[in-house]
């Protein structure tokens, strides 16, 4: 994967718009620290729909990413937020990725962002996270909500309940530790507001029932997941005329718009391309329109043994 090839100016512009507009997975109905939006209103072009980044802005973001583990979706997402906040006239960033150490020099934690809102005078500690979780069906569960431990990352290394616990019990409370309070004081900050922005997608099983997780934002972004052996049958139930794309991971944020038709798959070629997969694959279904191929919905295809492994992961050390 090449940074400049997969993250064009058009893609960066679309992703910057996405993080401003897309709904959060959890809002203040779950916990007071969760926020639905971050940026104050602004009339600058960057913060308006349809804005296209200038070449020098694209080069700036590429340069920022090249000094990081840019292949990780979370790093990419965080870098986009850094850029937006730095460009906002009402925001003054005081610190980003600021580590807090214990007396023995081990790391206690890290402040994702500390910034000052120049309109209100409020200084905020902001934690950022981008997550994609797949829901595990459970026939005996409540019909209105699922447990957060039923939602796991596609690689089974992440689980929603654990992430929420870490955000709320550790990351957002860092300033309340003696070590964290000393770091905040060194910035000249006397009072700190605390906020969490958690965005992403929740993918629901095609076969089996899994309602939304408890206390989540009902307007969250949604997709599906299906086992490889069930994919052919499921695709037959989908509208005709769809084409399927397998985007690089850094293109998982904004709705897909693709001009290069050679990357498309029809149903037959999609089935061939995922035959025998060992890891979940994100697929985006598109219609062909005058301006190219535009996303209709997205889904993960998972190996046939994935659900069994996911069930074990959801039960482990709750």
Image (spheres, grey):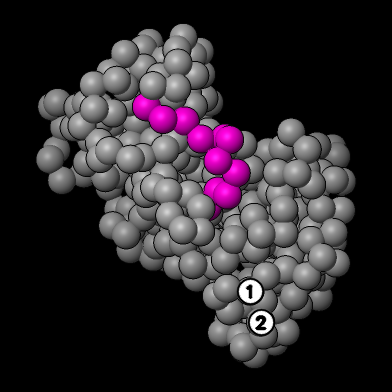
Residue at image mark 2: 45
Q: How many marks?
A: 2
Using the numbered discs, state the Cα–Cα distance from disc 1 to disc 2 in whole angstroms.
6 Å
Look at 87% across and 53% down and name the residue there.
Answer: 63
- Above or below: residue 26 compared with residue 101: below
- Above or below: residue 102 compared with residue 290: above
Quadrant in which the C terminus appears: top left
Q: Position of residue 198 (x, y in %)?
A: 50, 54
104 or 28: nearer the viewer: 28
Look at 66% across and 59% down and name the residue there.
Answer: 10
Please give left or right for residue 156 compared with residue 84 in the image.
left
The reply to whether residue 247 is visible in this rendering is: yes
Look at 71% across and 49% down and name the residue there.
Answer: 7
Please give left or right for residue 127 compared with residue 24 in the image.
right
254 or 88: nearer the viewer: 254
Q: Position of residue 130 (x, y in %)?
A: 55, 48
Query: Magenta stretch containing residue 260, yes or no?
Result: yes
- Above or below: residue 38 compared with residue 151: below
Please give left or right for residue 37 compared with residue 233 in the image.
right
Stretch of the chain drawn in magenta: 257-267
The reply to whether residue 180 is visible in this rendering is: no
Circle 2 — which element? Answer: helix
294 or 83: nearer the viewer: 294
Residue at image mark 1: 51
Q: Position of residue 260 (x, y in %)?
A: 60, 44
Dots 1, 2 in contact, CB < 8 A: yes
Q: Position of residue 110 (x, y in %)?
A: 72, 50
Query: Badge 1, how many Cα within 10 Å: few under 14, some, many 20+?
Result: some
Quadrant in which the N terminus appears: top right
């Amino acid at each position: 994967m090449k940074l400049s090839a997969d993250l064009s100016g058009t893609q960066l512009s679309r992703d910057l718009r996405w993080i401003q507009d897309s709904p959060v997975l959890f809002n203040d109905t779950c916990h007071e620290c969760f926020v639905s939006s971050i940026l104050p209103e602004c009339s600058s072009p960057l913060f308006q729909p349809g804005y296209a980044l200038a070449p020098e802005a694209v080069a700036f973001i590429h340069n920022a990413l090249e000094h990081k583990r840019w292949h990780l979706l979370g790093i990419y997402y965080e870098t986009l937020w850094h850029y937006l906040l730095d460009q906002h006239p009402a925001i003054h960033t005081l610190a980003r990725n600021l580590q807090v150490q214990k007396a023995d020099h081990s790391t206690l934690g890290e402040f994702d962002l500390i910034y000052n809102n120049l309109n209100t005078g409020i200084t905020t500690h902001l934690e950022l996270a981008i997550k994609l979780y797949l829901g595990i069906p459970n026939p005996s569960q409540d019909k209105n909500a699922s447990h957060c431990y039923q939602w796991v990352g596609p690689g089974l290394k992440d689980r929603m309940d654990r992430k929420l616990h870490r955000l709320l019990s550790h990351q957002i409370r860092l300033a309340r530790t003696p070590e964290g309070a000393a770091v905040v004081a060194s910035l000249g900050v006397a009072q700190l507001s605390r906020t969490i922005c958690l965005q992403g997608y929740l993918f629901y099983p095609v076969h089996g029932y899994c309602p939304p997780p408890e206390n989540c934002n009902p307007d969250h972004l949604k997709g599906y997941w299906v086992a490889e052996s069930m994919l052919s049958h499921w695709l037959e139930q989908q509208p005709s005329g769809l084409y399927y794309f397998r985007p690089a991971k850094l293109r998982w944020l904004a709705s897909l718009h693709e001009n290069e038709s050679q990357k498309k798959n029809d149903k037959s070629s999609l089935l061939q391309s995922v035959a025998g997969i060992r890891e979940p694959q994100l697929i985006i279904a598109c219609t062909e329109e005058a301006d190219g191929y535009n996303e209709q919905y997205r889904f993960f295809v998972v190996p046939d043994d994935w659900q069994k492994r996911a069930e074990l992961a959801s039960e482990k050390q709750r």
